[in-house]
Image (cartoon, helix red, strand yellow):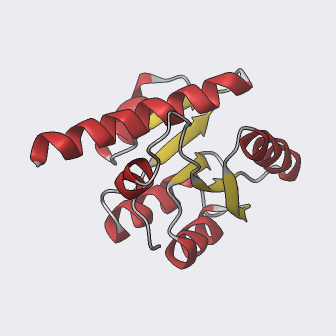
Amino acid sequence: MTNSIQDKKSNNDTKTKPQFEILVADDDYNTVDVFSEYLELMGHKVIAKAYDGKQAFELYKNTLPDFVFLDMMMPEYDGFYALERIKKHNSDSHVIAITADLTKDIEEKLEKMGIDAIIYKPFDMDSIISVMEKVYQKSHTETHKLS
């Protein structure tokens, strides 16, 4: 990927929001389609769609998206499989978990694995953009603190 998230912000001098490249991973094809359509309507570009954790990781390596929306409960290769490998490949990656599991154990496991945010099903579509913007702002603020 040629631009980092910070580059996108600095290349965007107007007050419009930056466009992000996104990978969406869920075993439900309809969910992937609806999710992708919504993100594109909001001005973002879905550059990859995956239907299991193994495919999500392979597509991540090949496309290096700004954000990954990752369903955690998928058959065979789940979201945990993908999250572990994505974070090993790039610890600065931005991965947002999508899950219906509200247990504290899952939340703690995701946090230990380096998840950037968790969206619980069922969710309001507007929360997707809100969470993504919060992750972006947090990473942008942390980068400037280091400078």
Residue 99 rendering spot, x and y as whole percentages: 61, 34
Which residue corresponds to the image point at 36% horizontal and 71% vertical from the top-left?
89
Q: Specify whether residue 3 is in view.
A: yes
Q: Kindly give the residue lying farthest to the front in the view shown.
A: 14
Residue 51 rendering spot, x and y as whole percentages: 74, 61
Q: Specify whether residue 122 is in view.
A: no
Residue 10 rendering spot, x and y as whole percentages: 37, 51
Residue 5 rendering spot, x and y as whole percentages: 41, 54
68 or 112: nearer the viewer: 68
Q: Kindly give the residue lying farthest to the right in the view shown.
A: 30
Q: In this view, does 146 lie to the left or right of 104?
A: left
Q: Where 124 falls versus 32 (above or below)?
A: above
- Residue 35, by quadrant, is top right
Q: In this view, does 118 lie to the left or right of 10?
A: right
Which residue corresponds to the image point at 22% horizontal and 46% vertical from the top-left?
143
Q: In this view, does 126 lie to the left or right of 15?
A: right
63 or 98: nearer the viewer: 63
Which residue corresponds to the image point at 56% horizontal and 36% vertical from the top-left?
16
33 or 16: nearer the viewer: 16
Which residue corresponds to the image point at 50% horizontal and 33% vertical from the top-left?
15
